[in-house]
Image (cartoon, helix red, strand yellow):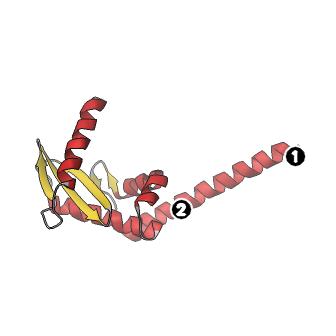
Amino acid sequence: MPPKAKTKIVKDVTQLVLGRRTRMCNFLEYKDTKVVYRRYASLFFVCGIGSADNELVTLEIVHRYVEVLDRYFGNVCELDLIFNFQKAYAILDELIIAGELQESSKKSVLRVVAQSDSIEEAENSEDTLARLGSRSG
């Protein structure tokens, strides 16, 4: 899909979602796609799903994702997602694979993410030690 078409879709869906009142249904139609969204404080989570997909299951997956983000970041906010978008995507990848819920356990997802963090920290420490060692030699 060309970038211009993607930009138009994002703009159109954003306007549709932001224009809705808080008490309105969290589902809407956009062309041949169902749009499911959920607002948490100032964060909006928006998903496009097929006509045969279940909206309530999608809302539950979004809720599960936000719960995991809350546990990981401690009351997730926009800045957490802006400055740690790689981590937000990694958490999403642990929950969903190929559009299907892969792991429903928040503890399992957080355990895998914590393991990934510790491996990343160990690699960063090794890199730092290697750089310090090459400077002194």
How far apart are labels 1 and 2 at the CA level? 32 Å
x%, y% of residue 48?
Answer: 21, 48
x%, y% of residue 122?
Answer: 65, 57
For the N terminus, the quadrant is: top left
**Identity, as a three-letter code, of the amino acid under mark 2:** Gln
Q: Which mark is residue 136?
A: 1
Q: Quadrant of residue 65?
A: bottom left
**Mark 1: which secondary structure?**
helix
Q: Quadrant of residue 4?
A: top left
x%, y% of residue 56?
Answer: 16, 63
Compare marks 1 and 2 and give the one earlier in the sequence: 2
Q: Which mark is residue 115?
A: 2
The answer to whether 36 appears left or right of 96 in the picture is left
Q: Residue at x 32, y 55 (%)?
A: 96
Q: Residue at x 32, y 63 (%)?
A: 42
For the C terminus, the quadrant is: top right
